[in-house]
Amino acid sequence: MAIELLDPSRAKAYRQLMLQAYSLHPQAFVSSIAHREKLPLSWWEGQLEDDLSALFGAFVDAQLVGIVGLAFEPWEEAQHKATLFGLYVPQAFRGQGIGEQLVQAVLSLAEQEPEIKVVELTVSADSSAALALYRRCGFEQSGLEDSAIRVGDEYYDRVHMRRLVEAAK
């Protein structure tokens, strides 16, 4: 398995994996499949060349089997923070440490940026596996947002988590 920064040449695989994530786990994402599947491939390419984020992919035999992103703050007053987003590993590849390696890739990138002091994220409160993964990676709960996501008539809470960043030596 290899972890790589994604570039626009990977947009088709990125789109396919994210649409799967939106379809199977709508409560875990702010975006919906109904909205995102309408977007042209050029939009997905743009996501992979945005200066305010970095997206990592996990590859097994050249197949994209996991993704995660790190978003940087555009405002000077908030540039000490970055946000981990969009972590997804399909069921068939879970339990192999891929998610943890993706999170570690994001944390390593954050450590390379001297202005970043904290990485934040939100996660579905009912996702015990994701919560456990983030805790193993040093994240601590910093808040709880009731009814943060609505899917149909159901509401889902989100846990806010954060981890201090140690500067790379």
Image: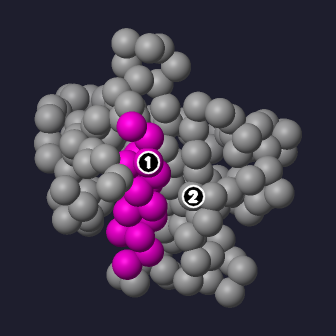
For image coordinates 38% across by 31% down, the residue present is: 115
Q: Quadrant where the C terminus lies?
A: bottom left
Whichever of labels 2 and 1 marks the residue nearer the N terminus, that label is 2
Q: Quadrant where the N terminus lies?
A: bottom right
Q: Which residue in the protein does label 2 denote?
A: 56
For label 2, the SS is strand
Residue type, mark 1 in image: Gln
Vertical placement of residue 87 versus 3, above or below: above
Magenta-highlighted residues:
97-114
**Quadrant of res 54:** top right
For image coordinates 14% across by 42% down, the residue present is: 141
For image coordinates 20% across by 50% down, the residue present is: 139
Vertical placement of residue 47 versus 107, above or below: above
Q: Which residue in the protein does label 1 denote?
A: 112
**Quadrant of res 23:** bottom right
Residue type, mark 2 in image: Phe
For label 1, the SS is helix
